Amino acid sequence: MTAPQDNPLPKLGIIAGGGALPARLASAAQTAGRAVFVVKLDRHADDPELDQYPGITARLGAAARILDAMRDNACQDVVLAGKVARPSFTAIRPDWRAAKLLMKVGMKALGDDGLLRLVGQELEREGFRLVGAHEILTDLAVSEGVLGTIKPDDQALSDARHGLRVARILGQADVGQGCVVQQGLVLALEAIEGTDEMVRRSANYRRDGVGGVLVKSSKPQQDKRLDLPAIGLTTLEEAHKAGLRGIALLAGGTMIIDRSAVIERADRLGMFVIGIRPEHDGDPEND
């Protein structure tokens, strides 16, 4: 008599944008014994590692094809991961399903967070369970305190706290998720260009004296299953090139991709990486 098998983990559908995160999620899911199906978004998903997993390539506006493919392949859980540069309505070329979705509120009235929330709600209406990347790769989420061997000084901590206040105001307006602060001055705010371009731009306004701090925060109203801000090696290298001294990340509301590699590289560059909370939640300094 055959012994009963444990219930398998739900099959994971990955809607993949750019960068390394989608492939990391696929690998982690398979290692945990979970089957995966990858929808690579055309012109966005760029990691060749994704080619080894079963899936399809679909344009951003092909909502019906994406939903049907995930349903036909028995996906139960769905995660959205990777960078997607927000296109214009005409560039999306929405099919009937996507057009119906966008017509509910009008795409022009929505910021990135509003659009993502709408997508998440529709996925759940279609019977999928929406999960966050940090639920699959549990070491992604940033904890509070200094993450390497380099500690920020008082000026850097002051810049980090000021930047967190600014970034959260930006987030409330659904504009961006980060800023660069040097000696109390905001050198750059993140909007549609993304973090790395904002960091490069900040170098044009760098002041004499000690360098500034890159601050990243999720939006206060953000569903943590959707598009939590993340940094990786590329952002760290761009911050170093721009003359920044370190990176401050909202604890519990941001992610680090390749955490060990990022921390090791930051230590070698003499840069700090710290998880902080809003001041009313406690002092972020790690003694």
Image (tube, rainbow, N blue to C red):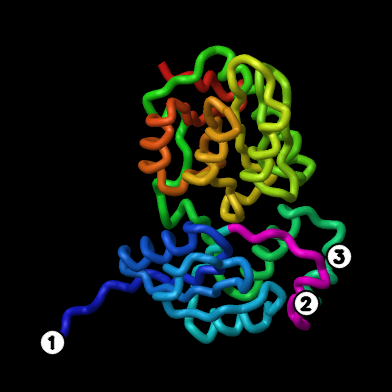
Asked whether the viewer can see residue 280, the reply is no
Whether residues under marks 3 and 1 lie with C-beta atoms below 8 angstroms apart, the answer is: no
Question: Is 213 inside the magenta-drawn segment?
Answer: no
The residue that disc 3 covers is 106
Q: Nearer the viewer, mark 2 or mark 1?
A: 2
Mark found first going from the N terminus, 2 or 1: 1
Q: Position of residue 14 (x, y in %)?
A: 51, 68
User: From the image, which quarter does the N terminus lie in?
Assistant: bottom left
Where residue 218 sits, quadrant-wise, is: top right
Q: Residue at x 43, y 30 (%)?
A: 269
Could you tell which of marks 3 and 1 lies nearer the N-terminus? 1
Q: Place residue 96 in its image quadrant.
A: bottom right
Badge 3 marks a residue whose secondary structure is: loop
Q: Which residues are magenta?
A: 83-98
Name the residue beneath numbered marker 1: 1
Q: Could you tell me which secondary element the residue under label 1 belongs to?
A: loop
